[in-house]
Image (spheres, rainbow, N blue to C red):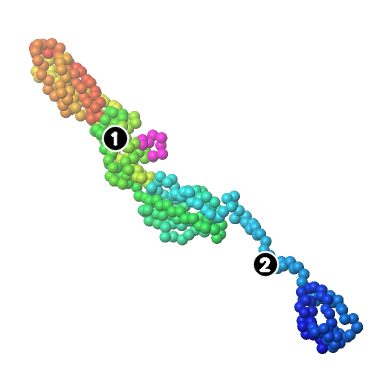
Amino acid sequence: MRNPQALLLVLAVGLGGCSLIVEGGSPGGTDDPSDSWGEDTGETDTEVTTGPTTDQTDTEVTTGPTTDQTDTEVTTIPTTDETDPSNTDTVKVLAFSINDPKDRYTASRNVQLFSEVGNARWMRLRNENDWWSNWEPFQKIRAWELMGPEGSLEVTAEFRFAVGSPIATAKDSIVLDLTGPKAPTVEREGPFYTNNQNPFFVWTSNGGGMGEYRATVDIEDFTSTEVLYTTATRAPMPTLGHGLHTVFVQEQDEAGNWSESGLQTVFVDLLGPTYQSFEIETSMGMFCTYTAENPVRVSMAFDDVDAGMEQMQTRFEHREWSDWQPYASSFTWDLSPPPEWKAIEVNVRDAAGNISYVSSGIYRDDVYERCM
């Protein structure tokens, strides 16, 4: 019988991959053939070389991952839409405003949106309490229509680099004012008829404006270069010609709306009264150049188709002029002594202030003698 201990040793060593010299016989040193390996060949000392089977080959194995498990460095190449020199998909809002940032009001629903956003490629917008627009390419300046009633309206914008990128939000508001101020009250500084070719006018706000005015004359056209822009409430008009003129004045509010026109008229009269007749009436005849009567009546006639006669003043014998008094077509003249040539002068003034002058005279004679 084979020695079990020797067999176990051979197996153990064989598995270790080494060579071993095994002596036959029992551990006790007997030469019993039944204790030898295999048939007895007569050789008690046998060299046995053990090595692993194919399945047990102890070779150095380099383990590599499968295709799905390859542990390599992966570089993600962005698509064209995602390419950006900053190598980031974060956007940053630097500025966002409706119209100029200084504008607090707008008189139109059509506005401009100004955006300064770093790294933005896409944007979308919406009015307050309204739906979002579709995503669209980023624009620094974008036309936009405000929706909603007059008053403060808000616009919200969102910006991003690409689909799935972080979104930055910006908002701004502006007051929509579509209603202009009330028309100002315009008054002349002086009478309706005037011979002043640069008459003054004054105007008063009736509410809703900011105290900025524009004025024009005769034609309600405020695109003309003749328009006067002023914050004053009193100003002269440009040089006006003879005739009737209408002054139009409007006031502006902070949104830029102009009021309806307040208006006032003036008549610039550059023509004085026209002399028609002047007579010294006596019983001796209307063509007499002398008279013994005292007093005498003076009759005169003037015509003024525009302003009309308004006042008159007289001067006798080159003395002081009388005060201005209401115009009269006739008056009495006291011919004081002594007998001599008596002169009379009359100024007639129309309502515009134009003056016409006339003079005449008669010889006072104490002897009554009728003129033929």
Query: 353 and 94: which one is in front?
Result: 94
From the top left corner, tell me how far across and down residue 330 is, in percent. 15, 25
Determine contact: label 2, label 1, CB under 8 Å: no
Mark 2 or mark 1: name the one nearer the start of the chain. Answer: 2
Asked whether 255 or 200 is in front, the reply is: 255
Residue 141 position (above or below residue 284): below
* Residue drawn where x is 83% and y is 85% of the image: 30
Quarter of the figure with residue 203: top left
**Residue type at tag 1:** Arg
Q: Is residue 260 toward the left or the right of residue 304 in the image? A: right
Compared with 93, 193 (above or below) is above
Q: Residue at x 42, y 58 (%)?
A: 128
> Percent position (x, y) of residue 21?
83, 76
Q: Nearer the viewer, mark 2 or mark 1?
A: 2
Q: Residues within 10 Å of mark 2 (few under 14, many from 20)?
A: few
Q: Amino acid at mark 2?
A: Gln
Residue under the point 39% across and 54% down: 153
SS assignment at label 1: strand
Q: Which residue is the site of mark 1?
A: 234
Q: Quadrant of residue 359?
A: top left
| Placement of 46 over or under 332, stated as above or below | below
Q: Few, some or many C-alpha atoms within 10 Å of disc 1 (few <14, some 14-19, many ≥20)?
A: some
In the picture, the quarter occupied by the C terminus is top left
Say which residue appears at 34% left-offset and 45% top-offset.
253
Residue furthest out toward the right:
42
In the image, the segment drawn in magenta is 222-229
Examine the residues drawn in magenta and state their main secondary structure.
loop
Q: Position of residue 108 (x, y in %)?
A: 41, 49
Find residue 291 and report its horizontal and vertical position in percent. 12, 15
Is residue 227 highlighted in magenta? yes
Q: Which mark is residue 70?
A: none
Tell me the tag on residue 69: 2
